Image (tube, grey):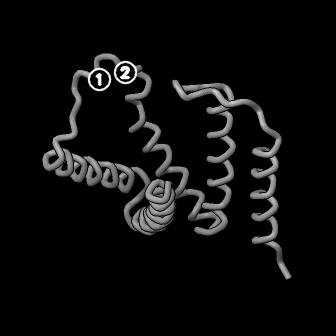
């Protein structure tokens, strides 16, 4: 549990840094060139890691839902929306809104058992948690 939690923390930190870096590159190079470069560099990096880890299960590609292979398209959309959000709202405010949306969407995915996830029962406490996050954003943006 500790390692998984630290991994999640690292993910949040990396996504925040990546969003700011991508926004800075976009300001100079343009949105879709930046998006293309980000994904090309990520692709090369992943191939290098794959070469060393040998973590490939090609037979799994035959049985996986083909819809799930469109994750790269979602990735391009993610880079686009994060860059636009950070550019217009600033890093902290944009990431807070992104996290609330991500939390709410993830709960809906679990609640309805979408995309082969385990279905969970409805709990008011989870919606209250999202509400508290929204209140946190309001307090964070509060002007003195």
The location of residue 24, given as percent across then percent down, is: 44, 69
Mark 1 is surrounded, within 10 Å at the Cα level, by few (under 14), some (14 to 19) or many (20 or more) other residues, namely few
Q: Give the x, y percent position of residue 88.
A: 62, 64
Could you say which disc has been placed on residue 64 in the image? 2
Q: Are marks 2 and 1 in contact (CB under 8 Å)?
A: yes
108 in relation to 83, above or below:
above
Q: Position of residue 60 (x, y in %)?
A: 29, 23
Dot 2 surroundings within 10 Å: few (below 14), some, or many (20 or more)? few
Disc 2 on helix, strand or loop?
A: loop
> How many labels, in total?
2
At x 75%, y 64%, the residue is 137
Local secondary structure at mark 1: helix
The answer to whether 47 appears left or right of 36 in the picture is: left
Nearest to the observer: residue 49 or residue 138: 49
Rendered image: mark on residue 131: none
Residue 141 vertical placement versus 56 (above, below): below
Residue 30 visible, this angle: yes
* Cα–Cα span, label 2 and label 1: 5 Å
Residue 117 sits in quarter: top right
Furthest residue in direction top, as rendered: 63
* Furthest residue in direction front, as rendered: 1
Give the residue at x 77% y 64%. Answer: 136
Q: Is residue 116 above or below residue 17?
A: above
Q: Is residue 15 visible?
A: no
Residue found at x 69% / y 43%: 104
The residue most toward the left is: 51
- In the picture, measured across the screen, residue 51 lies left or right of residue 68, that is left
To which residue does mark 1 refer?
61
């Amino acid at each position: 549990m500790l390692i998984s939690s630290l991994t999640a923390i690292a993910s949040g930190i990396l996504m925040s840094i990546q969003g700011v870096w991508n926004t800075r590159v976009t300001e100079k190079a343009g949105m879709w060139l930046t998006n293309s470069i980000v994904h090309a560099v990520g692709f090369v990096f992943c191939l290098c890691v794959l070469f060393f880890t040998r973590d490939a299960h090609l037979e799994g590609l035959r049985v996986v839902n083909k819809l799930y292979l469109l994750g790269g398209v979602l990735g391009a959309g993610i880079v686009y929306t994060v860059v636009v959000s950070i550019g217009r709202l600033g890093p902290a405010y944009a990431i807070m809104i992104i996290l609330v949306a991500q939390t709410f969407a993830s709960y809906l995915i679990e609640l309805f058992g979408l995309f082969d996830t385990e279905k969970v029962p409805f709990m008011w406490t989870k919606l209250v948690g999202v509400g508290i996050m929204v209140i946190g954003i309001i307090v964070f943006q509060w002007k003195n």
